[in-house]
Structure formats: C-alpha cells, structure tokens
Amino acid sequence: MGKDVIIACDFPNKEKVMEFLDKFKEEKPYVKIGMELFYGAGPEIVREIKKRGHKIFLDLKLHDIPNTVKSAMKVLSNLDVDMCNLHAGGGSKMMQAAIEGLTREDGTRPMLIAVTQLTSTSQELMENDLLIKEPIDKVVMHYAKTAADSGLDGVVCSPLEAEKVHSVCGNGFVTVTPGIRFADGEVGDQVRITTPEKAKEIGSDYIVVGRPITAAEDPVAAYRRCVKEFVG
Ligand code: C5P
C-alpha cells in the first residue's frame, strides 16, 4: 500500500488554488478537491489540476438513491479522478451501485472510500436526530465493515480509529485520515489530532493535510516535512 500525503486544497476559486500549486516546482502532490472548489469552479478544475500531473481525491461525499449515485459516479470516473467518496449511510446497495458506475469499460476505476459518521456527529446528535442508540464507535466500525463488504476500498476516519478499522476490515482496507497537525503547529478547529509521524505509526494509509500546509509561510517546506514524517 503506497502511503501518501494528500493536500486539502480548500480554496474558494481557481486563481487561488493555481497560485498555491504553482509554488510546487519539483513535487506533484496528491490534491483533495472539496465541495467549495468543485461547485465554485466546476468540473474543469479537476481536468486542469489533473493535466498538471497531480493525483486527485474528489471529496463530494455522494448520498442518494443507488441509481442516481451510479450515474453520478460514472461522470466522476470519466473525469479521471484517482479517489472519490460517498456516505456509507446510503447503504450497501448504494455502495455497490457506486462501484458499478465508477468501473470503466476496461475494468479500471478510481478508488472509492466511505465516510462513516462525520466527525461533526456526536453521540447526542446520533441519538436525538438520527435515532441511532448504539455507541458511536460501534456504528463507525459497522459502517466501515458494510463498506468493505460492499467492495469499497476504504474509509475516511480519524487516525485514532485507523488501527481498529484495519483490525475489523483487514489491513488492505485503506484508511484516509484528516485531523493532522505538526507537534509544534496550530491546532485550529480540529479536536482529535495526530502528527504525521504518529499517523504513520498507527497505520494510516493516506493523511489529508490542509491548513498546516496551505496556511504555512512556506507551503512546500511544510509539505516536505509531512512527507518526511509520514512516508519517511
Ligand atoms: O485544514 P485541515 O488540515 O483541518 O483540513 C482537513 C481537511 O479534511 C478539510 O478539507 C476537512 O473538510 C477534511 N475533513 C476533516 N475531517 C473529517 C473529514 C474531512 O477534517 N472527518
């Protein structure tokens, strides 16, 4: 499993993201494009960043009826993204339909990972708003197992959950983990955080790093530090 650092490019428009990527003269970092940039700049932004030689994780978290997700995934697959995602809460039929939609005629497809419960979901929210009474850890692991059984490649989770996800779903099941901060860096609004070095130790497969790189005085140096700590 190739470990890699994915930069969360949470920029509002094309100019800002290109200005940021222009700083990288030697490396072509793996880039995460989220809803803000995708909805603001349109699918063209994916093609342009891809053309520059970057791998792309398109973080749109699809959640709809199976047929709609299947058709939408087909479009994303044609955009040639490397990784995309959905909400495991859509159920196994939706996840299986997503894989069908993603799979190209030649049998290849982007990696597909699931969001289990969002990190913004608390036990209280789950019980009161969703009427799910089980402990959140158990729910997260159940969703991860359902995703694995539906043929998905992995989940987005906290690095602190990566070890358990691997023990429940197997070591080949990929963990993509945000919530990364340097030991001497700013924490911001993240709560359960880990350093790149610690994420490596716990067994994360990919770390998603936003502000510690994008808001750094020298983003290229910050990226290199992440790679050094996480990949070695
Ligand atoms: O700037 P920062 O490193 O906190 O960015 C983390 C990125 O990962 C953001 O794009 C955020 O939306 C995303 N993310 C997260 N926690 C999750 C899922 C996604 O921080 N559970």
Image (cartoon, rainbow, N blue to C red):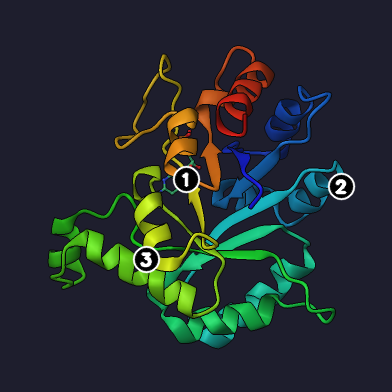
Residue 203, numbered circle: 1
Which numbered mark, 2 or 1, is in the foreground of this view? Answer: 1
Instruction: Determine which residue is flagged by label 3.
Output: 168
Q: Amino acid at mark 1?
A: Gly
Is label 2 within 8 A of ligand 1 (CB to nearest ligand atom)?
A: no
Q: Would you place residue 143 above or below residue 163 in this image?
A: below
Q: Position of residue 207 (x, y in %)?
A: 53, 41
Q: Would you place residue 161 above or below residue 94 in this image?
A: above
Q: Quadrant of the C terminus?
A: top right
SS under mark 1: loop
Q: Amino acid at mark 2?
A: Lys
Q: Amino acid at mark 3?
A: Val
The residue at the point 42 percent across, 41 percent down is: 202
Query: What separation in Å lies between label 2 and label 1 (alpha carbons)?
Result: 31 Å
Instruction: Determine which residue is flagged by label 2.
Output: 51
Tell which circle, 2 or 1, labels the residue nearer the N-terminal end.
2
The reply, left or right, for residue 76 in relation to residue 86 is right
